[in-house]
Image (cartoon, rainbow, N blue to C red):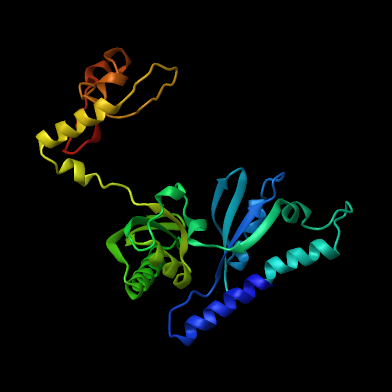
Amino acid sequence: DSIWQSEKSQKEQRKAQSLKSRNGSYIEFISSVDYDLITKSLEDTRQGIRLLNIRTINKEVRAVVYIPAGKENCFLKKIKDFETQNTKDGNPKNAKLISSIEDVSIALVESLWTDPPSMLPEQKTAIWIEAWLRVSDNEESQKEEIESFWSTLQSIGIEAKPNYLAFPERAIVLIYASREQLVQLLISSDMLAEFRVGQEASGFWTNESSIDQAQWVNDLLSRLNIQSSNVKVCILDSGVNNGHQLIQPVLNNQNCLTVEPSWGTDDHASGSGHGWNR
């Protein structure tokens, strides 16, 4: 109950200050030391309760769950049933779930950060971050949800790229934010699932001059430590030019194969910009 009271108090304070606040709650569940967290039992899609991400830290399993406003009693009922009801086998109801939980708390920014903690932005220093959002499967609904998210970003003063990637039940928006701004975003948005550090866009490398690209390649080669192993990677593609300086050390001619000999093994995809042709 204290978690919900804390959430309610925070929302009332923001409302009094005319600040936007999310409707639901982000809750983090932490496993007991000797138990695996029963994560499937944490989600209830019929009630809109969604499992957002799962992390393992120091042998503890941590799961973040989004609970819509008004659905808080779903978890309280499971605890009450554990205390007051038994199954046909005579065991407490929901015993596996309740026994697997060591702690429950309001999720923080760190709870949604699924990359190494050391990569979290500083309090007031912004970096590019992937905001993974919980969205609908319907394309039109997705667009409306993303526009709503962009509006939230604008109200906080967070810069964002004008496009996004969409997947089933997830969308990725690239934002430029500090940890302080991520806290505000977590308080304001119901759409968050996780945060990850923004990936380097390939355009940076492809737009470099040939001389600069060669310097980057030589710099990387000087830091590589390639060792023989039994690991094999099979790439199904339209060919590969193993004359590339970064590919040559790990791919010899004998391992460049083709189903049809007349095709050749070199990269022969039509059009420009094919990855293995660089």
| 38 relative to 203 in the view: left or right | right
Q: Does residue 277 appear anywhere in the picture?
A: no
Q: Residue 179's image quarter?
A: bottom left
| 42 relative to 205 in the view: left or right | right
Which residue appears farthest toward the right when viewing the image?
90
Q: Name the residue at 21% across, 23% down.
A: 266
Check the picture and name the quadrant holding the N terminus. bottom right
Q: Residue 254's image quarter?
A: top left
| 201 relative to 34 in the view: left or right | left
Q: Position of residue 240 (x, y in %)?
A: 25, 25
Which residue appears farthest toward the bottom when viewing the image?
16
Q: Position of residue 41 (x, y in %)?
A: 67, 55
Camera-nearest residue between 20 and 271: 20
Check the picture and name the quadrant holding the C terminus. top left
Q: Position of residue 6 (x, y in %)?
A: 60, 74
Q: Position of residue 26 (x, y in %)?
A: 55, 65
Circle count: 0
The image shows residue 254, relative to residue 57, as above or below, that is above
Q: Name the residue at 20% across, 46% down.
A: 203
Q: Name the residue at 28% across, 46% down.
A: 200
Camera-nearest residue between 36 and 164: 36
Q: Does residue 76 appear anywhere in the picture?
A: yes
The image shows residue 197, relative to residue 249, as above or below, that is below
